[in-house]
Each structure stands twice: as structure tokens, then as C-alpha cells.
Image (cartoon, coloured by chain):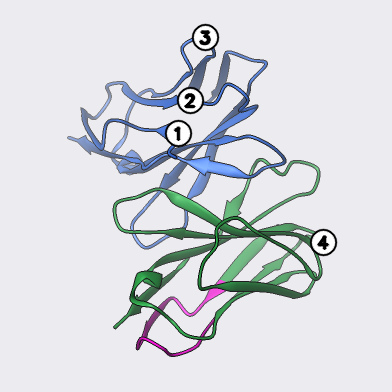
Amino acid sequence: SQTIHQWPATLVQPVGSPLSLECTVEGTSNPNLYWYRQAAGRGLQLLFYSVGIGQISSEVPQNLSASRPQDRQFILSSKKLLLSDSGFYLCAWSGSANPYEQYFGPGTRLTVT
Amino acid sequence: DQQVKQNSPSLSVQEGRISILNCDYTNSMFDYFLWYKKYPAEGPTFLISISSIKDKNEDGRFTVFLNKSAKHLSLHIVPSQPGDSAVYFCAASLSWGKLQFGAGTQVVVTP
């Protein structure tokens, strides 16, 4: 069966510091990968998606970037965090046959102080 | 621009009764709709989905109804159980699986 891992589970970082969140998927090959953010009291906002290694599409302009160095690895980064980057970050995957049904990881709670 | 809206932030229902969650959308081009369930500090889990060519899909205790003319989606949970207490998100896809989510509805199932 497929599993998705995210780490760390929680992170507290000062403003201006860099960020690296990692997501890996097991049990499937060539998945579509996604990064979402949930701000307090709001729904999930799609940040990035990827259909293959090195292929990244950004949905909203922001202080973040994403990379996919391996087929089942997706990384969310920032060079300098802003207070507004605080939130709950979720990685998700879907099969290329049915990209609609997405399966989420446990998430990372990021607090920028 | 919020194209998927869940206007009820919370819902309280008695155990054994029906829970009805509602979702409205504005873009008639959405072609696929989904419901997710989320517990605190966890990622959402996929519950049920429906294609825009259908008006009903059923899976066990969960049924999703789609009214395209009203641009309205609903999720029925029958019977409601304590483990159903969670936040429920509806989502809609415009293309290729790029989902837009509503803000969620907190469901509390009481004994």
C-alpha cells in the first residue's frame, strides 16, 4: 500500500531564517505531488504541484519554492521566512490515472516568530 | 476569489441521526467534486467523490449529492457516529486534479 511521510511534524523558526520541509511517498511510482498550506480558520490552498522529476508548477506568488529531486520526493523551501508563512503545510500525492483523488500526509505545523 | 464555499462553520448532530453538510460553488466548469475529513493535527483523508456527470454517489454511510443547476454539493452521513466528529472539507477540480477547497465544517456528534 501507499504511504506518505512528512517531516518535521512541528517547526518553530525565526523570521528571516531558511526553511526546508520534506515529503516522500512509498508504494507508488511517478505520482503527482502537491504542497498545500492551511492558514488558521481557512481551507487548504494549493501552493505547488509536480507531475514529474524537476517539473514544478506554482499556483500562487509567494516567498516559497518547491523542488522534486527524485520521483517520490518533494521539498518545500524558503530562503528567508516571513511571519505570514506560518501555517499548516500539507503534502499530497495522487496517481497519474486519477489525479483528482489526492492523499495527504500528516502535515507540518510551522510557526514563524 | 473563493469559488468553493462552506457556509456553515459548524454542525452539531446527535449520534445515530443524519448529518448533512453543504457546499456551494460558483464555477460551472468544475468537473469533479470530493469530500475530505480531517482530524486535528492530521492531514485530510479522502472520503468520497463524484463526477459532474452524476448526481449521486454512495459509499457505505456516506452519500454525496450534486445539484449542478444550483451549483450545490452535499454530504449525508447516516447514521452519525462519534468517530465522525471532525472537520469536513469539500473540494472541486477545474482541471487535472488542481483542487479548490472550502473553508471546512466542524462536525460534532453528541451522545
Frontmost of labels 1 and 2 is 2
Are discs 2 and 3 located on one and the same chain? Answer: yes
Asked if the residue at tag 3 contacts the one at tag 2, i.e. Cβ–Cβ closer than 8 Å, the answer is no
Q: Looking at the rendering, in which quadrant would you find the N terminus of chain B?
A: top left
The green-tinted chain is: A
Residue range corresponding to the magenta coloring: A6-21
Cα distance in 3D space between marks 1 and 2: 7 Å
Asked if the residue at tag 2 contacts the one at tag 1, i.e. Cβ–Cβ closer than 8 Å, the answer is yes
Cα distance in 3D space between marks 1 and 4: 31 Å
Disc 1 on helix, strand or loop?
A: strand
Q: Residues within 10 Å of mark 1 (few under 14, many from 20)?
A: many
| Residue B12 covered by magenta stretch | no
Pinpoint the chain carrying mark 1. B
Residue for badge 2: B26
On the picture, is B2 further left or further right than B87? right
Which is more N-terminal, label 2 or label 1? 1
